[in-house]
Amino acid sequence: MTGEPSSLDPAEKVDLWRQRFFEAQAAAEEFILGQHGEEGLAAWIQANSRITADLLRAQRPAGVSATDHFMTRLQRQLLLYDSAVTSEPQPSGTVLRNADCGILRYRKRAARAGVVLTFSSPCSYCQELNTAIAARYVEPDVTVSCDQAGDGCTWRAESPHAP
């Protein structure tokens, strides 16, 4: 290599951060499964959910419910990968519809490029992790659930006491 490296444009930076996160996550998953099996993965999800819930508590803006903060974080996470996600307020809570998951699309593209994936689909991991985060973070009377459909999913945060 010679000369000064050229700076990256914003789209290249986004792609590089996605790639680096993907690499780190894949390495952690492979290591945990290889060293500790499914029990290790369950422990990883619990540790990750505890750490994330603690961070969310520290970062929650004043006047925003934990549930709204969690659902906004989830929506923004999906948008980082250009998912087709919408948020719909409902009488019982909030519904996030992820019609085309960018995380799943990104992983499928990586697999086609020859990357060996730890999981055949990231969906069950994402669902387990995010419901574990919600269980530790959102208000006690709120239930967070996820239904998978095709290349997307629907997340619901519902309270029986919603107005």
Image: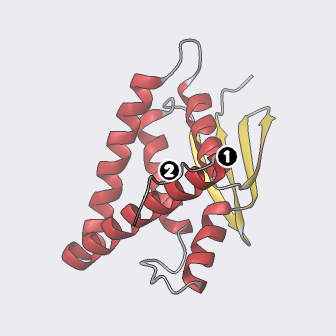
Mark seen at residue 131? 2
User: How far is the residue under mark 2 from the one under mark 1?
Assistant: 10 Å
User: Relative to the observer, which residue lies in front, 52 or 115?
Assistant: 115
Mark seen at residue 128? none
* Quadrant of image for the C terminus: top right
Badge 2: residue crowd in 10 Å (few <14, some 14–19, many ≥20) = some
- In the image, farthest residue toward the top: 62
Residue visible at 53% across and 27% down?
66
- In the image, farthest residue toward the front: 3
Which structural element holds mark 1? strand
Badge 1: residue crowd in 10 Å (few <14, some 14–19, many ≥20) = many
Mark seen at residue 156? 1
Report x, y in % for residue 3.
Answer: 43, 57
Tell me where residue 44 sits by quadrant: bottom left
User: Relative to the observer, which residue lies in front, 124 or 12?
Assistant: 12
The type of residue carrying mark 2 is Thr
Report x, y in % for residue 57.
Answer: 41, 26
